[in-house]
Amino acid sequence: LSEASHDAAKVVEGEGVALDLHVLFLDDITVGGSWESTRHYLDRLAPRLAAIGLRLNFAKCEIICESGLDAATWFPEIPAANVHSPRNWELLGAPMGNPDCCTAVAETAIDRASKRTQLLQSLADPQIASSLLRWCAGACLAQHIARSCGPIVLPALARLDADTMRTWECVNFPLAPSERQLASLPTSAGGLGLQMLAPFAAVAMIASERCARDKLSALLSQRAHDNLAPD
């Protein structure tokens, strides 16, 4: 599915549609540009997908723009509820809006992760509970949010860190404060692999930004790249 849709999208992009942003990830396609170029892109993409048995699900499409009226004019098939302001939106689960938006999205996501973490306390096998806690409870999602938002979501990350440690102690045995620090080290370094995220949120965001900076020229059109602020 992903490969087929990506092939179709790349063909349309190669036909000279003037987009500023064109990013493909699994079955998600993210495009950016003028109303006219984006409409033209979707009109060219839809029949190419239909030819291989696929279709665009407009009920799940989202528009990020300043004017909802323009969105309704250019894309009447996309529900009004899916039109978002640049100050309040998400991309692949990462909040991209203003600080209030980032905080709200992070709080909601980490609330869910904390609940999953606490549910592990009911498992009878401590090895299974500990493995799920390390890899499945919420650390991956929280890392994603930390890289996107950095220090502004520290309270939410600290709450998840506390729930993670509390759950491990509940299914295993209590740890002294100094032992908790060691427990957060990777297993290869003699720790328990319990990922503590709050202390590293700022570093994670800086590292993410630095890694992404070199890829902007490949993701954005030359015009959009040239218009980026120097910082």
Image: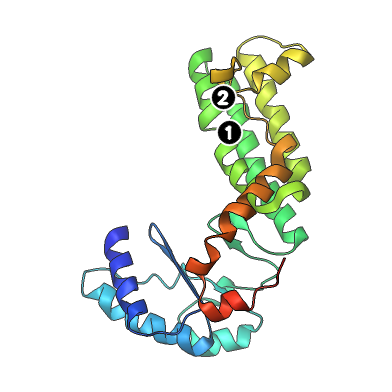
Pointers 1 and 2 in contact (CB under 8 A)?
yes
* Label ID, residue 120: 2
Q: Indicate the secondary structure of the residue bearing disc 2.
A: helix
Q: Hey, what amino acid is under mark 2?
A: Leu
**Residue closest to the eye, 208 or 33:** 208
Q: Could you say where residue 154 lies in the image, as x and y percent from the top left?
A: 76, 43
Label placed on residue 225:
none
Residue 3, percent from left and from top: 29, 60
Query: Quarter of the image containing the C terminus?
Result: bottom right
Q: Where residue 28 sits: x, y (%)?
A: 42, 62
How far apart in space, not on screen, are marks 1 and 2 (Cα)?
A: 7 Å
Relative vertical location of residue 113 with respect to residue 52 in this rendering, above or below? above
**Which residue appears at 77% of the width and 14% of the height?**
178
Horizontal arrangement in the rendering, residue 98 relative to residue 119 (left or right): right
- Whether residue 79 appears in this view of the structure is yes
**Splitting the image into 4 quarters, where does residue 2 fall?**
bottom left
Residue sitting at x 70%, y 31%: 161
Using the image as rendered, state which of residue 183 and residue 113 is in the foreground.
Answer: 183
User: Which residue is drawn at the image coordinates 59% and 60% (left, top)?
Assistant: 213
Looking at the image, the residue that sits furthest to the top is 173
Image disc number at residue 116: 1
